[in-house]
Amino acid sequence: MRNNLSGRSSQKPRLKPRKQAIKEAKAQVLNEAIDAIKDDLRAIKTEEQRRGHYRAISKLSQIRDEL
């Protein structure tokens, strides 16, 4: 038997598959966008503006869920 004492004996940590990493990054960006819209929503006074923000949050949530 051969003894693996060279630098190659230690294995690299396993990385996430590329597609999964991209999917998670997209979801994170969408979550940050939703959070930013929710922060803006707190300062809005008119009902029309609130409806627009709620619509945007719903659309971004739908896109995130379809990933």
Image (spheres, grey):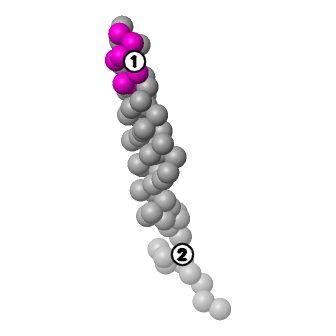
Q: Amino acid at mark 2?
A: Ser
Of residue 13 and residue 33, the one placed in the foreground of this image is 33
Residue name at image x 49 percent, y 59 percent: 20
Extreme-top residue of the structure: 45
Above or below, 30 against 45 in this view is below
Image quadrant in which you'd find residue 21: bottom left
Say which element carries label 2: helix
In the picture as drawn, the residue positioned furthest to the front comes out as 48
Mark 2 neighbour class, 10 Å CA radius: few under 14, some 14 to 19, many 20 or more: few
Identify the element where label 1 is drawn.
helix
Horizontal arrangement in the rendering, residue 65 relative to residue 26 (left or right): right
The stretch of residues the image draws in magenta is: 46-53
What x and y, as percent, mark residue 23? 45, 54
Q: Which mark is residue 50?
A: 1
Q: Quadrant of the N terminus?
A: bottom right
Q: Which mark is residue 63?
A: none
Label 2, on which residue?
A: 9
Residue 62 to residue 8: above or below: above
Indicate the position of residue 32 as horizontal and vertical percent values: 40, 34
Describe residue 1's horizontal placement relative to residue 36 as left or right.
right
- Quarter of image, res 55: top left
Q: Quadrant of residue 33?
A: top left
Which of the marked residues, 2 or 1, is nearer the chain's N terminus? 2
Residue 49 image point, x, y percent: 34, 17
